[in-house]
Image (cartoon, rainbow, N blue to C red):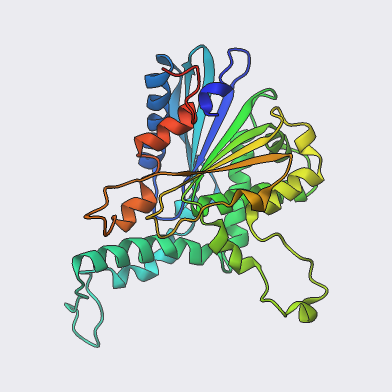
Amino acid sequence: MGLADQLSPDRPLDVVLVHGMCTHDKAWGRAAIHTLQAAMTANIAAARDTEASGTIPLAHGVEFVRDTAVIDGSKVRMTAIIWSPLTAPLKQQLRYDDTGEPTDCAVDATCKPKRARLNGLAKDTLLNDCLSDAMAYQGASRPVMRDAMVAAFNEVFKDTPADARIVLISASLGSKLSFDALSQMLESGSPGAGQAAAARLGQIFMNANQLPILGLADQRLPGTLATAAAAPEVPADSLQRFLAARSAVGLHAQALTPRLAVIAFTDPNDLLSYRLLPSRYASPQVAVSDVLVSNETTVLGLIERPDTAHTAYMTNPDVASAIACGRPKSARCR
């Protein structure tokens, strides 16, 4: 089931996008929204703007881009949350090591690291700009980043109509950040936008899922339980924690859809992505599906560009079409 099956002239649809690791900006937000709107209008019906698009700043430099359109008689509001400014100051510390950048090699200010082209691309992009986000979140900065996302969700959802359906589209580290924030909102015990949003959350689309590897940081080594007997067990990953929190407060019974649908898109050549394994989340309250895609051409069957494989899900027309119309394609789509 895609966004097309959630359209209704009697009920608005709220789509929230959260980017993953690597630097993103307002241009990404606008492009992601345009891509989804184009995929829907190309397959369903012409759209017309009902509200001017805009950018709204939040705390810690976090901001979101929003645009609303009417598609096939249904009001569809799309909001892209940009959290990249949170980690930008930390990542600046690694700029000295970027390929071709002047480096302090003892005294020579013109000393620059020389790398093979592909090695330089991987070092500058996947490590210095992307993996660094995950390292920051898995350490001392996690509470600040999670709380900033809680504030962002509260702001995004504060004026969401009570009957609106909500769809979350997240990528790589953004999925963990989103689930950790939603869990915090539910576990805090304070009613508000978070609980209301979780009850109306009907679909989650995940690109470049990293929960299995990121979840390792939240687990104890086997055989160490005796030394941490007082510490409660935690779910293996943040999606499991969110589902448990959602069930604990009874939100699944209030949901607008019988089962929460979670769809994960994975390019097998994306070195930083993992399948979800539906059996891990088996429950009458959730339906999990894995969808394999290809984000770039494979050269001679040997290699696919690792940066594009990880970052091009939202520019992949197959992914956009699947989110818009589902697989198999919705009867509402051409």
Q: Position of residue 123 (x, y in %)?
A: 31, 67
Q: How many marks?
A: 0
Would residue 34 appear left or right of 191 to someone viewing this image? left
Q: Is residue 306 left or right of residue 291?
A: left
Q: Residue at point 56% right, 66% down?
A: 138
Residue furthest left in the image: 110
Q: Residue furthest front?
A: 301
Which residue is at a point 63% across and 60% down the rendered structure image? Answer: 143
Question: In this view of the protein, which residue sits in the foreground, 111 or 196?
Answer: 196
Give x and y (percent) for residue 54: 44, 30
User: Is residue 66 visible to us here?
Assistant: no
Residue 278, image x, y percentages:
61, 48
Q: Quadrant of the N terminus?
A: top right
The answer to whether residue 203 of the structure is visible from this angle is: yes
Could you tell whether 177 is left or right of 249 in the image? left
| Residue shown at the point (81%, 43%) measured from the top left | 249
Up/down of 216 relative to 104, above or below: above
Q: Nearer the viewer, residue 279 or 198?
A: 279
